[in-house]
């Protein structure tokens, strides 16, 4: 399994407002764009900066959500997406409605970057501004970047050089993560999936990882009786945190096809492969709970020989010590 690349510089682009981003992150999940959309944004931004003459290498990306507004109906037990029906033909006629989930976002992006131009503070500041200007002209998860309402000083991009030594590095990151508050960042929690799988197998030996994933994707209520004989409904979310099912990449359904050999693809110059979504468990955490930059960042882990195109995050939960 791959590990997060060594982080020398962090490029922080704070307080972006994104309108009508894609809220349907996979065939089974919704509520926030898939992390694969932000990995794709990182690659597209790297190509754009190289074309502009900026020698920047983008290695990983972190997302901090400050606010969101999924475009769904209000009230009722079941929510529905607010859909639009737009003319698609020359004569103005419309086709059948295709469900399109949308969400408005207020986010900050943190990129792990490298490049010779970042060694000089003045050049680095100008580079950060250029990247911010490029990003404002791009789509983020299909959504449009619009002017945020926060003051300009809070929207100014900046680059942070991380020291090689562990102690000053952690101290500097502690200052940085406070600038990302208030907000929440998405991390991967495979340990919670393994734990729930073990718990289910104790009651049912043939329980699968899918059963564990579905169990964590919902709130499970049980009628339980304590030692004193008091009975009440209890749920399994106590001390679990803001846990959500997420897509974490794609798995190949067959061999990679030669460029141009598959009809109706977007790019006939690039090899093509049929894939399906891979799923995992994520958790939304406040940035102040992270101890190092690797906990914040997501990075690609492509293994074409194994048919895996995956996004990874190296978050590890820290033990909680209780004071006597």
Image (spheres, rainbow, N blue to C red):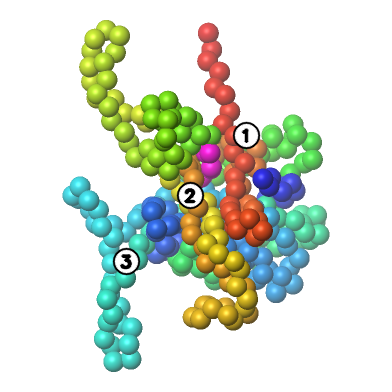
Circle on res. 99: 3
- Magenta-highlighted residues: 184-190
Mark whose residue sits in front, 3 or 1: 3
Q: Percent from the top left, x then y, of residue 9?
A: 72, 50
The residue at the point 58 percent across, 80 percent down is: 261
Which residue is the site of mark 2? 279
Disc 1 element = loop
User: Which tag, 2 or 1, sits closer to the chain's start?
Assistant: 2
Q: As drawn, is 252 to the left or to the right of 54?
A: left
Q: Percent from the top left, x then y, of residue 63?
A: 54, 50
In this rendering, does residue 125 appear at all? no
The residue at the point 74 percent across, 72 percent down is: 53
Graded by Cα atoms within 10 Å as few (under 14), some (14 to 19) or many (20 or more), the crowding at tag 3 reads few
- Label pair 3/1, CB-CB below 8 angstroms: no
Circle on res. 291: 1
In this rendering, does residue 170 appear at all? yes
Circle on res. 322: none
């Amino acid at each position: 399994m791959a590990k997060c690349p060594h982080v020398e510089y962090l490029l922080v682009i704070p307080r972006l407002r994104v309108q009508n981003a894609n809220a349907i992150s996979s065939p089974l999940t919704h509520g926030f764009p898939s992390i694969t959309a932000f990995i794709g944004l990182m690659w597209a931004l790297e190509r754009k900066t190289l074309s502009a003459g900026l020698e920047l290498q983008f290695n990983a990306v972190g997302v901090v959500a400050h606010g969101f507004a999924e475009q769904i109906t209000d009230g009722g037990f079941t929510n529905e997406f607010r859909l639009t029906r737009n003319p698609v033909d020359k004569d103005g006629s419309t086709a059948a409605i295709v469900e399109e989930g949308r969400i408005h976002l207020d986010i900050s992006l943190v990129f792990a970057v490298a490049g010779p131009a970042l060694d000089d503070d003045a050049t680095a500041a100008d580079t950060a501004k250029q990247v911010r200007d490029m990003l404002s002209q791009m789509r983020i998860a299909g959504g449009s970047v619009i002017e945020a309402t926060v003051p300009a000083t809070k929207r100014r991009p900046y680059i942070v050089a991380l020291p090689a030594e562990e102690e000053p590095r952690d101290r500097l990151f502690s200052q940085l993560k406070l600038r990302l508050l208030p907000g929440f960042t998405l991390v991967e929690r495979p340990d919670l999936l393994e734990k729930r799988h073990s718990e289910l197998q104790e009651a049912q030996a043939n329980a699968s990882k899918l059963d564990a994933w579905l169990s964590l994707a919902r709130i499970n209520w049980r009628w339980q009786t304590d030692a004193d004989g008091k009975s009440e409904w209890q749920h399994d979310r106590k001390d679990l945190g803001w846990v959500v099912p997420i897509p974490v990449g794609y798995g190949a359904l067959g061999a990679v096809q030669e460029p141009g050999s598959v009809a109706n693809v977007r790019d006939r110059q690039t090899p093509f492969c049929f894939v399906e979504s891979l799923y995992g468990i994520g958790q939304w955490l406040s940035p102040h709970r992270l101890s190092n930059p690797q906990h914040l960042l997501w990075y690609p882990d492509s293994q074409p020989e194994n048919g895996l195109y995956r996004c990874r995050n190296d978050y590890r939960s820290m033990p909680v010590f209780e004071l006597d």
